[in-house]
Amino acid sequence: MRIPILQILLSMLLSVLPAAAQGVEAWTYPTAKPTEICSAGTGAADDPYQVTAAQQLANIAYLVNETEETFAGKCFILKNDIVLNSGVLTAVAGGTDGSLQQWTPIGRRANPDDDVHSFCGSFDGDGHTVSGLYIDNSSKGVDFLRYTGLFGAVGIGGLLHNIYICDAYIAETVCRAGILCGYAYTEGTAVTDCTVRDSKIKIFKTGAGGSSSAAYQSGYIGGIAGAIGGNGNIAFCTTKNVVIEHADGHNAYIGGIAGAVAGSVGFCSAGGSIVIGNDGITEDTSKRYAGGICAQAGGIVTDCLGAVDFTIQDNADVNAAGICFSSGSAVVRCVNRGSFALSSPTAEETELNDVLASGICMGATAVSDCANYGSFTLSGYTSVAATPPSLAGIYLDYTGTEEAASFARCLCVSTANSFPAELTGVRIAPMIASGTIPEVTLCYYLFSDYTTQSTDLGTANPSLDFFKGASLLSSLNSKGEWAAASADGLPVPLGFDALGSTLVLDELSSLQSSLLALCHGRTMPTVVWRRTMLLNSWNTLLAPFVLSADELHAAFGNTGLYLEQLKAVRDEDAYVTLSFGNVLPSGALQAGTPYLLWVSETGKALSRYTFTDKTIQAGIAPIRVSTSTPDNYVIEMTGCYGRAALPIYSYYIQNDKFWFISDESPAVTSKGYRCYFTATEGLPLTRAKVLHGDDTTTALPVPLASCPSPLVPRYTLDGRRASTHTRGIVIAGGKKIMIK
C-alpha cells in the first residue's frame, strides 16, 4: 500500500510539535444548556462524572453559571490531560494572544451570601493537567465583581483535589483571582494536593485608591486561590515559577498560594515571584499585603516553604512577609528562601515609601521552628518618606504593639545591602522588631552588611559554621524536629527535603486539632509523635491513627503491656466500678478511641515515637457506658488531641487518683493525646475503682475541691432537687454549701 507523500510529511511535522500543541481541542462556551454533562459517570462518589474533554469542562461552567445547578454532593474526576490553548505565555509575551480562546470560570457567584452560581461538588484532577488557561478582563471596570480562575466561585461542600495547571495567564483589575480558584467559601478543607506551574497573574491599574463599589474594593490574588472563606483550609499545594504582578491602586491581599484564607494553611510550597507597584499612581492611599504563602490566615500556618522573590517598586505602600503577613493563630515549622528587593524602576519614583518586610510573618500569636534564609536589597532610591521602611529577619510587629506571644527555635541567615547615607532612617532588625520584648527561646541570627539603624531581639550573630554545626542541631532537637538541609546544610524542620512527608504531633501544642484537620484522611509517610508515657503507671491515651498489635509491641514493649478499653460501669457497695477490657494481645488501637495504657518494659516509656504510613483521623469517638441500675447513670470517656482546658464537672486520672474539676477549682489544662471522664448528674462518684481485664483492681480515691461534686445530689433549702446550674446556698451530702 502506497502512502501519499503529504501524509508522510504531516506525520513527521506532528512528531516534532510539542505535546500541548498536538492536543489543543476545539471547544467553546455554550450558548444553550448542554444536553449532557459528561459521557460517563453518574456523579456518585463511587461513580463520578468522567471529564475527558475541554468541551465538557466548558459545559460544567455553563450549567453552574447560567442555571441553578451547583452539583452539590456530586463528584467529578478528570480522566485526560486538557489543553485549552497552546503556548499562552509565549503568545502574551509576543502580543499575539488575541487569537486565544478565553476561558469562562466555573462559578460566577452573583451574591456573596448565596451558593447559587457556585460549584459545590468535588472535583478530583486525578493527577492530570489542564494547560493553556487564558482569561483577560483587564479592560473591565472596577465595579464588575469577578471570581477568576479555572474555577471562579466554589461554595459550601466544594472540594478541589489533585489538579495540575500549567501555562496559564490571567489579566484582571480588582477581583478575587487564583489560577485554580478565585474564591472558595466552604467548611473544612477546600483545596488539597493541587499544583500550578509556569503561569502568570497580572493585575492592571484601575485608578488611585478607593472604589465606587466600596464593599469590593479589595482584591485577593493567589497562585492557587484568591481567597478561601468560611472556615476553609488549603493544604498540600504547590506553585512553581508562578509570577504575580500587581500595579493596581486598590487594597489587595496577595499570596504565592492564596491571598487570604479564613482557616489554616499547611504543607504548601510556593515558588516564583511577586511584583508590586502602583504604575505611577499619584496620591496612592491603598495598602498591599503580601505573603510568600498567603497574605492573611485565620488559623495556623504550618509546614510551609516560601521561595517567592518579592520586588516592591515605585512608591507603593506594601507589607510583605516571606511566609504570611498575618496569622490569627501561630506560624509553625516554616522556612523562607525568597528574597526582598525594594527598587525604583524610574527616575520619577525615588522616594522610599512606608514598606514593611519580614522574613517569616508580621502578626501571629506565636512563631516557632521557623527559619528565614532570604535577603534584602534596596536600589534606586535617594530619599525616604516621612514614615521610613522597616525590615526584620523573622518577625516585624506592624501594629506598634507586641503581637506575638513567643518565639521559639527560630533562625535567620540573611543579608541586607549597605544603604546610602540618606536612607539611614530605614529600620532593620536582624531577628525581631517588636513594640515590647516578647518571650524568645533558642533564636539565632547571622545578619550582615547593613547600616546599624536597628533594633533586635534574639541571640546575636554567631558564625555560619555555627548554623551548620552539630551543636545548634543538638539544641534544636529537644523535640526531634530539625535536620540539616541537603542543599546547603542549613537547619530546616524535619521533612522539608520532601515537603509534606513528615507530620509532627506534639502533646504540648494547642494547635493539634487544626493540624490534624489539614491532614485528615491522608496517609503520612512519617509521623513523629511526642507523647510522654509513664513507666509502671496507667496512662490515658488517644491517637489519631490506627496502631496494630505488632506496632503497639514495637513501640511500647513486648512484656507487661496492657491496652484497655472501657466496657461497663457499676454503681454498688459505695463504689462506682469502671470495668475495662484488654485489647491485646491481638487487637489494634483504633483512631480517635480513648484507652488506658500500661507500659512496664524499661526503655519503652518514652516521650517521642516514630511511625510510618499512618492514615490520619481528625475525629474523636467517645465511649459511653451506662449502669444497670434503675437510674441508668452514664459514664463517658473521651479525650483531646491538643493541649486544652478540661471542662468543669469532669474527671481525670493522675497519680492513681480520680481527680474532680469543680466549678470552684482552678482551671486544669491537660496535655494532648490524653483522656478524661464525665458522668451523669447524680452518680455518687466520690469513690471509684477500676476493674482491669486481668481482674485486678485499682482504687481511685476522688480528691474534691472546696466545692463538692455536682454529681452528688444537691437540694435547695426547701427540699427541691437543685440542678448543676443552681447558685446560692444548697445542701449536698448533708452539708450546707455556697455555690457561686
Image (spheres, grey):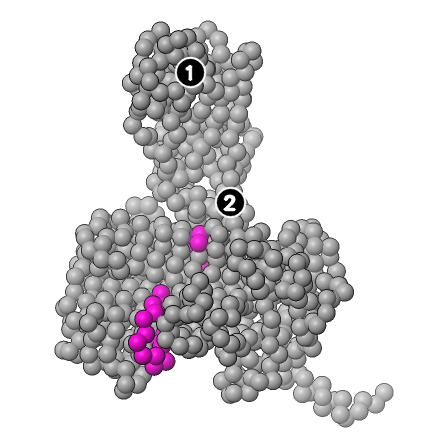
Residue 531 position (above or below residue 488): above
Kind of residue at badge 2: Ile
Q: Residue at x 73, y 57 (%)?
A: 41
Which sits earlier in the primary sequence, circle 2 or circle 1?
2
Q: Nearer the viewer, mark 2 or mark 1?
A: 1
- The answer to whether residue 136 is seen in the rendering is yes
Q: Residues within 10 Å of mark 1 (few under 14, many from 20)?
A: some
Residue 514 screen position, x and y as percent: 43, 46
Please tell me how crowded label 2 is: few (under 14), some (14-19), or many (20+) other residues with Cα within 10 Å: many
The residue wearing badge 2 is 616
Q: Residue 316: x, y in percent?
A: 31, 74
> What is the distance, in whole Å, between disc 2 and disc 1 at their CAs?
43 Å
Residue identified by numbered label 1: 722
Determine the residue positioned at 72% across, 90% down. 9
Residue contact between numbered discs 2 and 1, judged by CB atoms under 8 Å: no
Q: What range is drawn magenta here?
A: 262-289
Residue occupying image coordinates x 21% and y 63%: 430
Tell me the quadrant of the picture where the N terminus can be found.
Answer: bottom right
Percent coordinates x, y for residue 27 in the rendering: 68, 75
Q: Residue 29 location in percent, x, y?
A: 66, 72
Q: Is residue 684 above or below residue 622?
A: above
Q: Residue at x 36, y 52 (%)?
A: 328
Q: Given the current orientation, which residue lies at the most extreme bottom position?
A: 5
Quarter occupied by the C terminus: top left
Identify the element where label 1 is drawn: loop
Q: Is residue 577 magenta?
A: no
- Lateral position of residue 225 relative to residue 699, left or right: right
Q: Is residue 281 magenta?
A: yes
Number of callouts: 2
The amino acid pointed to by label 1 is Ala
